[in-house]
Amino acid sequence: MYCSSLAKLFFIVQSSLLFSEKFTTEFSAFRLVLDISGGNVNGEIVMWPEHGGDNQKWHFDDDLTIRSELGIVLDVKDGSSEVNTPLLATKKLQREHQRFRVVPVPE
């Protein structure tokens, strides 16, 4: 399934939800999507206008990682649990802070 309007998602570290779907996240109020800044390994995850690039397309993998079409995954910077810790796109290393679950927000 490819979704273009998943504005109401939370990414929560250390998950148990297993499914593999392709999606683009969209913050519908401003038509912004999750984007790997610069499309590079260690690029910060930012909200950016949708342009359809591979750095804006995401997959839920069976190992609980969220992988971009570029083959790199969401990663909590330095594995920190501090408030305002940024997300990066890094190589998949099977770290706990690369595992997520998606929780829908009630309407």
Image (cartoon, helix red, strand yellow):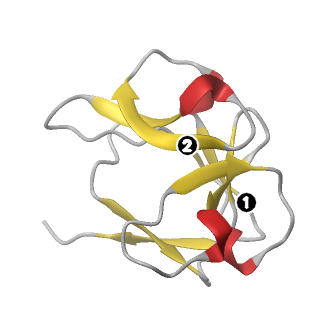
Q: Is residue 1 visible?
A: no
- The spot of residue 11 in percent (x, y) is 45, 66
Q: Quarter-wise, where is residue 66 in the image?
A: bottom right
The foreground one among 92 and 81 is: 81
Q: Residue at x 48, y 58 (%)?
A: 86
**Residue positioned 60% across, 24% down in the render:** 38
Residue 2: x and y in percent read 52, 37
Mark number displayed over residue 61: 1
Q: Residue at x 83, y 57 (%)?
A: 92
Local SS, label 1: loop
Viewer-side residue, 49 vs 9 = 49
Q: Which residue is mark 2?
A: 44
Left or right of 23? Residue 7 is left
Q: Quadrant of residue 31?
A: top left
User: In this orientation, which residue lies closer to the viewer: 56 or 103?
Assistant: 56
Which residue type does callout 2 highlight? Glu
Q: Amino acid at mark 1?
A: Asp
**Residue farthest to the top?**
51
Residue furthest right in the image:
93
